Amino acid sequence: MAFLQNMLILQFSVFSVMLQLLIPAAGQALPGCPDRCGNLLILYPFGIAEGCHLGDEFFIDCTKVTGIPLTPYLAGTGIPVSNFSLDQGELQIMHFVARDCYDINGSLDKNLSRVRVLSLNPPFTISSTKNKFFVVGCDTYAIFKAYREQERYITGCMSFCGSLGSVNESCSGVGCCQTSIPYGLQNHTVKMASYTSHAFIWDFNPCSYSFIVEDDQFEFSSKSFRELDYTIRLPMVLNWQIGNETCDKAQEKQGYACKGNNTCVNPINQSGYFCQCLPGYEGNPYLPEGFRDIDECKNTNISATFYPSFMEQLAASGATVVESRVQLDGNSVTSCGPSTTMEFSVALVEQLY
């Protein structure tokens, strides 16, 4: 009886260890640093307190403003940050929608119209692969002007339609147009205008809209005219990188940022580098070694079974869930509960000897 009790204790201890090994570490900030601003988890190299970010350019402003929910802002810009993607060197922000509105007499409605300007500090640039520039309206054109360092770029598109009935579900010039964005842009301004001041379509389309938006975050339809009336911001993706040297040169220096089980990536058409976990690993490749007792990039690519009520948590950790009494995968041994104590014990002994 004592033997079985000891084996049960051993089995549940192994369950606990397995769960800790499989589930990614919740803390992604530097140890001892605040890791949340509002609802956003702050991931190093970014930080919201002194000494908690890699450099000043990675500071996230989390200053509390009376009457406004706690919101993380990109330092020096007033632009809300909504997500991080460390392994892609990307940052999601919420950027304003521009409006060009007219009253019933064809005069520009200055109360509703909004001109939007975006200006970014290094190392942040507008992603050319994850965003598109959209213009929505039935009597409008928009000119997009931007700079890559000292080089100027101009693009844009125009959109027309005579009625909502003529609008289809594709953004191809009838009620909506779109265009790609050159890489490496650090700022942009948009000039919007109308050929006839919306005179012939004012009853259903008094305003036109333009915005840069993440590819899969906007889908045009005839409902877009009304929906955009109430849309202030839309998500946009920015690229970022560490420093201005390639991986080969950065690896030779003391301040090299990549830690643990990682690889260094040279971004296309950009200087600097960013870090990625090796295939089969996940976590934060920027956290210094020695701060934790497990690798910050840890392997979760295993198959396992577990107690039924923990199956969803196990699957969320990245492991492949298998419905079996005892599951062996490499050096890992898991079982589905106390009823498998003997089978689990035998499997452990076989693994050890």
Image: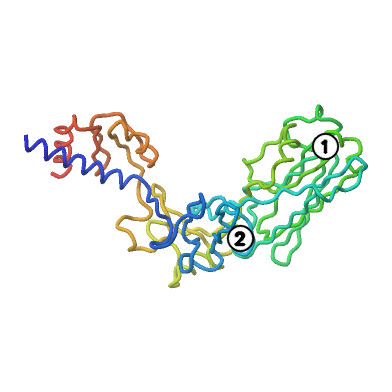
Amino acid at circle 2: Phe
State the residue position of label 1: 205
Of residues 221 and 103, which is closer to you in this image? 103
Q: Earlier in the sequence, mark 2 or mark 1?
A: 2
Dividing the picture into quadrants, the one containing residue 15 is: top left
Pinpoint residue 342: horizontal percent, then vertical percent.
14, 33
Residue at 59% in and 63% down: 75
In the image shown, does 70 or 139 lie closer to the viewer? 70
Within-10-Å neighbours for mark 2: few <14, some 14–19, many 20+: many
Q: Residue at x 55, y 54 (%)?
A: 70
Which residue is rendered at x = 27% and y = 39% of the image? 329
Residue type beneath disc 1: Asn
Q: Where residue 179 sits: x, y (%)?
A: 73, 46
Q: Is residue 325 above or below residue 179?
A: above
Q: Quadrant of residue 225?
A: top right
Please, which residue is most extreme toward the front here?
A: 66
- Describe residue 342's horizontal placement relative to residue 322 as left or right: left
| Quarter of the image with the C terminus in it | top left
Q: Cα distance, mark 2 to mark 1? A: 35 Å
Q: Circle 1: is it few (<14), some (14-19), or many (20+) Cα within 10 Å? A: many
Residue 348 x, y percent position in the rendering: 17, 40
Task: Determine which of the numbered discs, if any, sits on residue 124 in the image.
Answer: 2
Q: Is residue 290 left or right of residue 353?
A: right
- Classify residue 298 as left or right of residue 63: left
Disc 1, SS: loop
Residue 149: quarter of image: bottom right
Foreground of the two, 43 or 348? 43
Q: Residue at x 37, y 35 (%)?
A: 312
